Image: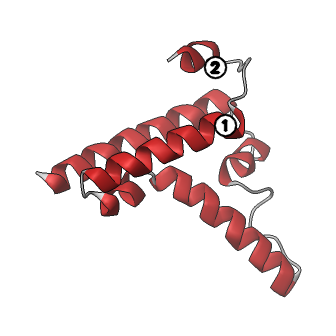
Amino acid sequence: MGFLRYNTYPARVMMGDVGAFLLGGALSMLAIFSKLQLMVPIMGVMFMMSSISCILQVGSYKLRKKRIFKMAPLHHHFELLGVHETKIVSVYTLLTVAACLASMLLIG
């Protein structure tokens, strides 16, 4: 919670690998213990979109020497299109909340 307090706009603290791996491991453990592993991709749809955009960008450049996005991951593409950072974060957050709510509806 302290990280979230100090990471509001403009971000002053970077989480780094240790914190990201800790959160990822905790989420994975919770999903496995609750037997809801298939809900993780639904809840993390924005993370998956960012990862897939990187994979597509690299694959396209290696195979065709053309880029799909101005820059990967996807949120940097939107920044280069002129969308403000706070708007991108807001939309990502809203889409993540909607995906989490949808996964909760699928469970019940």
Q: Where residue 49 appears, x then y in whole percent?
A: 56, 59
Q: Residue furthest bottom?
A: 63
Q: Residues within 10 Å of mark 1 (few under 14, many from 20)?
A: few
Q: Which of 14 and 58 is in front in this view?
A: 14
Q: Residue furthest right?
A: 65
Q: Is residue 57 above or below residue 47?
A: below
Q: Name the residue under label 2.
A: 7
Q: In this view, does 52 lie to the left or right of 66?
A: left
Q: Is residue 8 above or below residue 33?
A: above
What is the three-letter code of the residue carrying label 2? Asn
Q: Nearer the viewer, residue 101 or 30?
A: 30
Q: In this view, does 93 lie to the left or right of 7?
A: left
Q: Which image quadrant for residue 20?
A: top right
- Report how far apart the C-alphas of labels 1 and 2 lie in the structure: 16 Å
Q: Nearer the viewer, residue 39 or 22?
A: 22
Q: Which image quadrant for residue 72?
A: bottom right
Q: Where residue 39 appears, x then y in whole percent?
A: 31, 57
Q: Residues within 10 Å of mark 2 (few under 14, many from 20)?
A: some
Q: Specify which label sits upstream in the sequence, 1 or 2.
A: 2
**Residue 99 in sight:** no
Q: Where residue 63 appears, x then y in whole percent?
A: 82, 86
Q: In this view, does 78 lie above or below 32?
A: above
What is the three-letter code of the residue carrying label 1? Val
Secondary structure, mark 1, is: helix
Residue drawn at x 56%, y 13% is: 5
Q: In this view, does 104 lie to the left or right of 89?
A: left
Q: Mark 1 points at which residue?
A: 18
